[in-house]
């Protein structure tokens, strides 16, 4: 074995582990995607040429392995207990009292508070820094071995590295909760519905189903993530408190929830709970409560455990997000691709603090499967920012007046024929010029991951289409300010802002451009894959089906859809018109090479030589972003005359602060 090659492979593995961590866990990449891909290709090539170099901790080994016959079971060295639940403040205060009585403590006890993740509990076992084994909680004493599945989770470290805060222990059992973030969950379900498969009821079920796959190659395709919150047996590393333990895990590059509140008395913990509850729907994942833990590990040990749960911890649950209400009517909505989605109009009801009056019913088969009828009393649920859903009909409440739903034979918006192709879950309006479809296509076109046109909201798109000012997204680049200013609730200034935003959006990356087109089966990810492969619009336009299929992630379905879209004369005309209007799709590299690419600015105070919108436009044309509030992600704060509290915050965070003269020097 050539020692140089061995060393090279080890270096590549380490570099990739680090970039993987920076990208997936910290969301602070240091290298471009292209550079990461290059390192990964180099390692793959090296391993293909010299298979003996492949190590189990290689980042190339996250894609899954051939299916297992069944899961082996494994005993946990230390049982994985569950938690006692509390449902109101009184029960939490009683817990604190109990803890103090037990410890005979006069002073207040310090706790940590953590979001209670609604996922699946797992244990990861590391020996001498290598991930050797991963298992489910099972009955708390024995679980199923799901090592191959856990390896596919990008945020799970495969190999640990020494840090000053935490040397790699010889044995480390880490516990945590695997979950699927909400946006990814929505996408996953959308994909399943498109394929005619039953959607998952909620992110937790989707997580459990994904971890229970015997074929880890399927698991690898599921958007799983993890937060670690505890340890089992540890040899070779010690900590005095739960919080210090979490810090050690973080140092070892385990993902630890950044919202965990360290050491505080019970009153503060109760305030934290209220905040968490208020803001739970702003989180990108589901929580079902808060976990309180006595922070001091010596005290934890003294408190010990009851039969199934420790005396030192408590779960303070959130109120349920399920309610019952009545379906007043089943309406049908027409989407971007003409798909007809039945929607239940509900008697308004408050679910987890938000009034719900509509819930999606997905498609005809789903309604049939759940047998939901207009007039039914139903159980509905709201999960984070996911669209409320009808879980089931409460059939015992039926009176006989409920009406069974039938998909209309004609489009409720334009009256055209409705067609359901064999093997497809969705019935579709066949008229591509149906106003409902046009509106949805334009909304998609202007959305965040696409042209990101500020100020072009749903209502405005509706008006523009209804007034005949927009027939396609290409028309956006030919709007004139006078007709926009003439619309309801549009003043001169808002019209100007919109025109500016449209003009700015013309500098766009190829990936966003492809995504914006709204080609069926081409989501954000595939659009960027296409951009990376073809590097120009021309190249994609002339790509053959074979060239498309030669790409790893693209199969016949996507390839056919892309070809059909690009061969359609109307789509070709729209693309041509956009280019004529000055839309300039560029490669990611070209966008990244703009002077301010990757930088986020915050503006505060008044400028002498330009207005704030002008400064914003300058920054954006040079590839920078402008954000309204200061955070760690801010690169620079531009402070004009009479700056506000944003300047103080920037100073606190030690951010770079520019005055107007310095700013002008940079942008010119
Ligand atoms: S601590 C003995 N911390 O809740 C300590 N559990 O009902 C037991 N969970 O099985 C676990 N987030 O699946 C802990 N921050 C967190 C948690 C958490 C979610 C789950 C875990 C556990 C269940 C107990």
Image (tube, grey):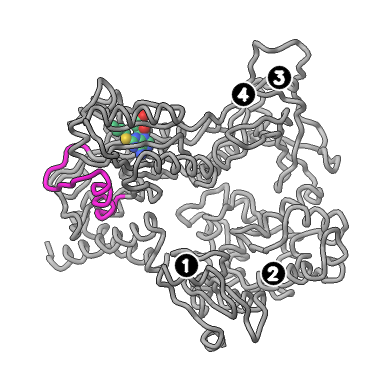
Across and down, in percent, residue 462 comes to 80, 53
Depth check, front residue: 294 or 378 = 294
Q: Is residue 239 above or below residue 480?
A: above
Which of marks 1 and 3 precedes in the sequence? 3
Separation of residues labelled 2 and 1 (CA atoms)? 28 Å
- Magenta stretch holds residue 63: no
Give the magenta part as a residue range: 232-254
Across and down, in percent, residue 113 comes to 36, 41
Separation of residues labelled 3 and 4 (CA atoms)? 10 Å
Pointers 4 and 1 in contact (C-beta within 8 Å): no
Which of marks 3 and 2 precedes in the sequence? 3
Query: Which residue matches tag 3?
Result: 376
Separation of residues labelled 4 and 1 (CA atoms)? 45 Å
- Which element type, helix, strand or loop, lies under badge 4? strand
Q: Is residue 87 above or below residue 411?
A: above
Q: Is residue 288 above or below residue 47?
A: above
- Magenta stretch holds residue 233: yes
Query: Which residue matches tag 2?
Result: 501
Across and down, in percent, residue 330 comes to 75, 29
Residue shown at the point (68%, 58%) measured from the top left: 445
Q: Is residue 384 above or below residue 46?
A: above
Residue shown at the point (57%, 42%) measured from the top left: 385
Depth check, front residue: 560 or 58 = 58
Q: Mark 2 packing: few (<14 Cα in 10 Å), some, or many (20+)?
A: some
| Image quadrant where residue 372 sits | top right
Which of marks 2 and 4 precedes in the sequence? 4
Q: Mark 4 packing: few (<14 Cα in 10 Å), some, or many (20+)?
A: some
Q: Quadrant of the N terminus?
A: bottom left
Query: Which residue matches tag 4?
Result: 379
Depth check, front residue: 527 or 400 = 400
């Amino acid at each position: 074995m050539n020692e140089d090659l061995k060393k090279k492979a080890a270096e590549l593995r380490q570099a990739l582990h680090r970039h993987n961590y920076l990208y997936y866990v910290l969301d602070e990449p240091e290298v471009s995607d292209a550079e990461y891909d290059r390192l990964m290709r180099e390692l793959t090539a090296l391993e293909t040429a010299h298979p003996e170099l492949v190590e189990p901790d290689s980042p190339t080994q996250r894609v899954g392995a051939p299916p297992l016959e069944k899961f082996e079971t494994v005993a946990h060295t230390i049982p994985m207990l569950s938690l006692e639940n509390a449902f109101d403040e009184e029960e939490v205060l009683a817990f604190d009292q109990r803890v103090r009585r037990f410890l005979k403590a006069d002073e207040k006890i310090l706790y940590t508070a953590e979001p209670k993740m609604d996922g699946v509990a797992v244990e990861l076992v590391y020996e001498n820094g290598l991930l050797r084994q991963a298992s489910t909680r099972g009955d708390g004493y024995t679980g199923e071995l799901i090592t191959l599945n856990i390896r596919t989770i990008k945020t799970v470290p495969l190999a640990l590295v020494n840090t000053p805060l935490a040397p790699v222990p010889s044995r480390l059992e880490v516990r945590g909760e695997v979950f699927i973030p909400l946006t990814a969950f929505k996408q996953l379900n959308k994909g399943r519905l498109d394929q005619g498969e039953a959607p998952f009821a909620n992110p937790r079920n989707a997580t459990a189903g994904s971890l229970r796959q015997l074929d880890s190659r399927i698991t690898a395709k599921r958007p799983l993530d993890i937060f670690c919150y505890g340890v089992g047996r540890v040899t070779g590393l010690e900590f005095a408190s739960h919080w210090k333990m979490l810090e050690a895990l973080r140092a070892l590059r385990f993902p630890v929830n950044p919202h965990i509140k360290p050491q505080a008395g019970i009153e503060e913990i109760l305030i934290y709970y209220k905040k968490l509850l208020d803001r739970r729907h702003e989180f990108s994942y589901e929580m079902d409560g808060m976990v309180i833990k006595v922070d001091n590990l010596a005290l934890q040990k003294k408190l010990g455990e009851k039969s199934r749960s420790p005396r030192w911890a408590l779960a303070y649950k959130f109120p349920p997000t399920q309610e019952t209400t009545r379906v007043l009517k089943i309406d049908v909505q027409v989407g971007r691709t003409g798909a007809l989605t039945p929607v239940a109009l509900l008697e308004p009801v408050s679910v987890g603090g938000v009034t719900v009056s509509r819930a999606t019913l997905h498609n005809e088969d789903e309604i049939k499967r759940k047998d939901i009828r207009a007039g039914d009393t139903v159980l509905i649920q709201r999960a984070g920012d996911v669209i409320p859903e009808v879980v089931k009909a409460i059939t015992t409440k039926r009176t006989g007046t409920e009406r069974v739903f039938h998909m209309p034979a004609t489009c409720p918006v334009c009256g055209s024929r409705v067609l359901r192709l064999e093997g497809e879950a969705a019935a579709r309006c066949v008229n591509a010029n149906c106003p409902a479809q046009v509106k949805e296509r334009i909304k998609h076109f202007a959305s965040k991951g696409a042209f990101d046109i500020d100020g072009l909201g749903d209502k405005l798109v509706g008006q523009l289409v209804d007034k005949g000012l927009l027939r396609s997204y290409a028309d956006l680049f030919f709007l004139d300010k006078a007709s926009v200013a003439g619309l309801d609730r549009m003043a001169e200034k808002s019209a100007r802002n919109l025109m500016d935003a449209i003009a700015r959006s013309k500098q766009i990356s190829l990936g966003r451009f492809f995504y914006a087109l709204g080609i069926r089966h081409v989501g954000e990810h595939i659009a960027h894959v296409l951009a990376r492969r073809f590097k120009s619009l021309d190249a994609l336009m002339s790509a053959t089906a074979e060239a498309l299929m030669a790409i790893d992630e693209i199969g016949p379905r996507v390839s056919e859809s892309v070809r059909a879209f690009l061969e359609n004369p109307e789509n070709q005309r729209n693309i041509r018109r956009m280019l004529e209007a000055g839309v300039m799709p560029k490669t990611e590299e070209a966008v990244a090479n703009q002077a301010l690419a990757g930088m986020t600015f915050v503006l505060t105070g008044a400028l002498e030589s330009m207005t704030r919108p002008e400064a914003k436009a300058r920054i954006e044309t040079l590839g920078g972003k402008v954000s309204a509030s200061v955070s760690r992600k801010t690169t620079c704060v531009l402070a004009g005359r009479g700056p506000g509290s944003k300047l103080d915050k920037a100073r606190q965070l030690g951010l770079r602060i520019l005055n107007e003269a310095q700013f002008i020097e940079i942008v010119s």
